[in-house]
Amino acid sequence: MRRGRGNPWFGIGLQVWSLGLEASTVMGLRALKIARGGPSARAEAERMVSEKVEAAAALQVMALTGALGATAPHASARTIAHYRRKVRANRRRLSKS
């Protein structure tokens, strides 16, 4: 999260919007891969579920250890950044195949 003047929630809103766009791209790419069927489709479906569980567990650890920050804007921005890294990695990986 950038430090500066003004309301931090505006920037957080833009981050959420960007995350939503990237997530919708990943959902489309995953749907295409799963629709093709076969072993890679099954592996992708399993990976999708396990990644979600791992990302949520990692975020809980961050929250319990104070890594998300002490204020609501910091915690929100770091939570969004955590999920954006995961979504971005999936978009890159799925775009190659």
Image (spheres, rainbow, N blue to C red):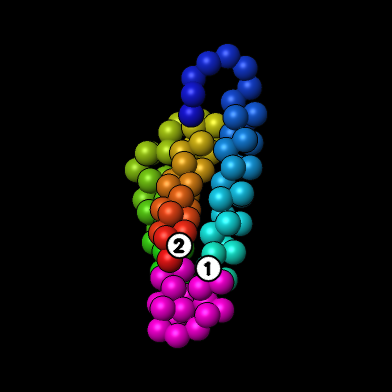
Counting from the top left corner in percent of width and height, residue 46 is at 43, 75
**3D distance between C-alphas at marks 1 and 2:** 7 Å
Q: Quadrant of the C terminus?
A: bottom left
Query: Is 44 or 10 nearer to us in this picture?
Result: 44
Counting from the top left corner in percent of width and height, residue 27 is at 57, 63
Majority SS type along the magenta span: helix
Residue at point 41% right, 78% down?
40
As drawn, 53 above or below 3: below
Highlighted range, magenta = 32-48
Residue reaching furthest to the front: 96
Kindly identify which residue carries mark 1. 30
- At label 1, which amino acid type do we have? Arg
The reply to whether dot 1 and dot 2 touch (C-beta < 8 Å) is yes
Kindly identify which residue carries mark 2. 94
Q: Say whether residue 96 is left or right of residue 29.
A: left
As drawn, 21 above or below 77: below
Residue reaching furthest to the bottom: 38
- The reply to whether residue 91 is in sight is yes
Q: Secondary structure at mark 2?
A: helix
Q: Earlier in the sequence, mark 1 or mark 2?
A: 1
- The reply to whether residue 64 is in sight is no
